[in-house]
Image: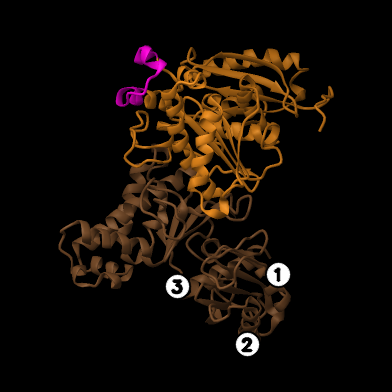
Chain colours: A orange, B brown
Amino acid sequence: MAASQSVLDPLAIGIDIGGTGTKFGIVDHVGNVLFSGDMSTKKNPQVEAFIDNLYTNVKVLIDKAGGIGRIKGIGVGAPNGNFYTGTVEYAPNLPWKGVIPLAKMIEDKFKLRVTLTNDANAAAEGEMIYGAAQGMKDFIMITLGTGVGSGIVANGKLIYGHDGFAGELGHTIVLPDGRLHAGTGKKGSLESYASATGVRLTTLEMLKNTTTPSSLRKVPPDQIDSKKVSEAAIAGDELAKEVYTFTGRILGIALANAVMFSSPEAIILFGGLTKAGELILKPTRENMEANLIQIFQNKVKILVSHLKESDAAILGASALAWETA
Amino acid sequence: MAASQSVLDPLAIGIDIGGTGTKFGIVDHVGNVLFSGDMSTKKNPQVEAFIDNLYTNVKVLIDKAGGIGRIKGIGVGAPNGNFYTGTVEYAPNLPWKGVIPLAKMIEDKFKLRVTLTNDANAAAEGEMIYGAAQGMKDFIMITLGTGVGSGIVANGKLIYGHDGFAGELGHTIVLPDGRLHAGTGKKGSLESYASATGVRLTTLEMLKNTTTPSSLRKVPPDQIDSKKVSEAAIAGDELAKEVYTFTGRILGIALANAVMFSSPEAIILFGGLTKAGELILKPTRENMEANLIQIFQNKVKILVSHLKESDAAILGASALAWETA
């Protein structure tokens, strides 16, 4: 398909709601973000005011794009977003508490069809429509950011499960009785290790429990974050490299388990942790293969998303609008 | 649907191929096994001879059932059976080595449409068509026998994955660096604990490493099997009960991980280990719930299959014939 754009082609709106900010954009069929913007989420403690402000902001872009007649629909990615009910339920990072009928509220305001899911499922849709998973019927998307999210596609469809909440690979237990996850109270989950927070904690533990020389020993503990660890590792710091080797080991086990569950063609990784490149990908790949039984070995691709990070959230959300159109 | 059977209703053939024996039967739409039989698998080192003998045996039943015109198709469950290709690939317990085009061979011989998958996927189809999963679109079937098999249904369809081999929950790693699985060479898999073999090994370890009094201390180690442990546990033996508490802990973690992956309505258990009843189900349920994040808690049913054990394999295989008809 050529990346051309007729003036008559329909467009989709993608809205990615995060705890701090909300990004939105108007996207064509091949994944060009034609117009985009952002606004604060947390400065809108009332969801009604948030919707009003969102409409005001997005309406400007709709007019630029040629008016509402060109818009096929709206896709929304939001934490704890439920595809079946269109609600956001008990999202710890959002200012609105309880169960919020967000899809219906946006639909009523915009008079456009709205499809909502969580951010990782939206990311998986984005990869399937515009990204590395084009043409794939079975793949797993894993977002390695502040937390770990996932979207699982099997038989060409996202798995939402019985209740709309499927795909929480980040909370699966990799090391029983392992590290406590402050947010969930569970021990040894993938997210407690293979997230920005996890990398920070692993680094602090290694600085404390080993004598490995490290440039990070000069950094005050409260200023150590995954970005600094990643930069140190890329610069050759031994301890920082060990942090990624360990993180890759945990991630590799989790990926092996995911592969033996749904046997995907590829696993697509996205997010901050992938910036360490082969430093994390190599141990991840090796530990995944080492834990796979023979019939699964050497056939699952681990790919890093090539969508522009600034566009990915909008693209993922907008993909929902095409999928359900 | 009434459990009645008109003489004109179509019928399905179910064939379950195991390492030792093969069971076959003719089944109606509501799960009555009208005619059935069995034969040796391992006495047929040549697959061609196996197919010839199978045909001879099954043909007798077909004639009893009113002739080939009444048969809609054949479903086959076999270890390492691949749904997409109809082949059995490198099955360690079958006498035929390499890749065997079993579906095609049976199709050519019987002149009937043949659908093949592994035994656990067939069991899941059986539960969906005739058993505890009727009407469910999202559930997981787990067979706890000599090994641990699984079949995962999402969006109303079995997940076969990219290569046809999805659903190997038994080989997922629950305790990294845990018990060595002699068959796969991997450490800490679900199957190395939550199978008949696993229960035997856990019992031997506990007899050796604890001083808990037990009636099993009088049994020679090479005669300890999961049946004896189950009987001892039911009779109140402390050590045997601890074996199931431990096994349930491992199984509970694995089920929690499966739930957070595909969010099923129910998990259906089948096989020898379920004979211990609440002795294994209670710790399994408790450990599953304890490892689930809040949004998944208290909503997934753990059910024990109510299909007759002697019929279940044939029913599961026969279900494939309806599914693809």
Q: Which residue is mark 3?
A: B308
* Amino acid type indicated by mark 1: Lys
B297 to A58, vertically: above or below: below
| Residues drawn in magenta | A204-223
Residue B146 or B64: which is nearer the viewer? B146
* Amino acid type indicated by mark 2: Val
Front disc: 2 or 1: 1
Can you give x and y, in whole percent of width and height, for residue A72 in the image? 73, 29
- Neighbor class of circle 2 (other Cα within 10 Å; few <14, some 14-19, many 20+) is few
Within the magenta stretch, is there residue A277? Answer: no
Q: Which mark is residue B293?
A: none
Q: Main secondary structure of the magenta part?
A: helix
Q: Which residue is mark 2?
A: B60
Can you give x and y, in whole percent of width and height, for residue A205 in the image? 33, 26
**Along the polypeptide, which appears first: circle 2 or circle 1?**
2
Secondary structure at badge 1 equals helix
* Amino acid type indicated by mark 3: Lys
The image quadrant of residue B2 is bottom right
Secondary structure at badge 2 equals helix
Q: Residue at x 65, y 33 (%)?
A: A127
B220 to A144, vertically: above or below: below
- What is the chain identity of the residue bearing mark 2? B
Can you give x and y, in whole percent of width and height, for residue A303 in the image? 61, 35
A297 to B134, vertically: above or below: above
- What is the chain identity of the residue bearing mark 1? B
Labels 3 and 1 touching (C-beta < 8 A): no
| Same subunit, tags 2 and 3 | yes
